[in-house]
Image (cartoon, helix red, strand yellow):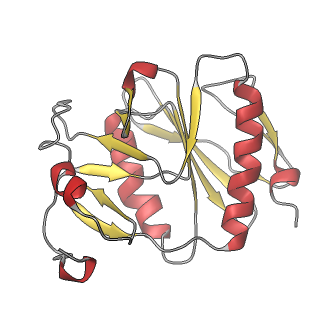
Amino acid sequence: MTFAELDLNGTYTYADYLKWTFEERLEIIKGKIFPMSAPARIHQRISWKFTEAIVKFLEGKKCEAYTAPFDVRLTPLKRDNSSNKVHTVVQPDLCVICDLDKLDDKGCVGAPDLIIEILSPGNSRKEMREKYEVYEENGVKEYWLVEPQDKCVFVYVLNEAGKYIGLQPVTDEDILTSTTFPDLQIDLSRVFDN
């Protein structure tokens, strides 16, 4: 099967995803296909700056960070890790996983502790709606949405009821401090510098 032969209105699982051999990158969110485009240079630059800061922060800690392409498999409601049951496979721009038992040779099974997604033209709805919902439903403790054009970061933190609470947005004039990792502080002026 080629990418062009996929029914974009169909419903797919991780088992389907494993069979595909085409070069196009895509994500499956709640069974629906979302094609991924090649990121722009500014996207990659910002991703690299966040990666540098987080890798440095994680030195000597048991948590690990991964950048896209890296499969994160999330399961709907029943937390069943069977390939046939996984209806969401995403490739976050950056994720941090502290429960290393969630890692296998294919990526991560279950919710990372922190996910960072960088908005690009054409992906805002997916990042702000579909991914927000599956990250919240699956227990991702902290979700950062990075807006390169306005040089700001929207931070969502899971509360005790399992719902995201949006914190005050931070801009390129601020230090971004993680709620999940309070010692992680990132100077956004360095992230967003040209």
Q: Residue at x 23, y 64 (%)?
A: 32
Quarter holding the C terminus is bottom right
Q: Which is nearer the eye, 126 or 2?
A: 2
Residue 58, x across and y down, in percent: 69, 25
Would you place residue 23 above or below residue 117 in this image? below
Splitting the image into 4 quarters, where does residue 51 fall? top right
Q: Residue at x 18, y 81 (%)?
A: 5
Residue 68, x across and y down, in percent: 52, 53
Residue 140, x across and y down, in percent: 44, 35
Q: Is residue 75 left or right of residue 169?
A: left
Splitting the image into 4 quarters, where does residue 75 fall? top left
Would you place residue 110 above or below residue 181 in this image? below
Residue 3, x across and y down, in percent: 26, 77
Quarter holding the N terminus is bottom left
Q: Is residue 44 left or right of residue 166?
A: right
Q: Is residue 31 visible?
A: no
Q: Is residue 177 left or right of residue 120?
A: right
Splitting the image into 4 quarters, where does residue 27 fall? bottom left
Q: Is residue 41 visible?
A: yes
Q: Is residue 3 left or right of residue 44?
A: left
Q: Residue furthest front?
A: 21
Q: Residue furthest bottom?
A: 4
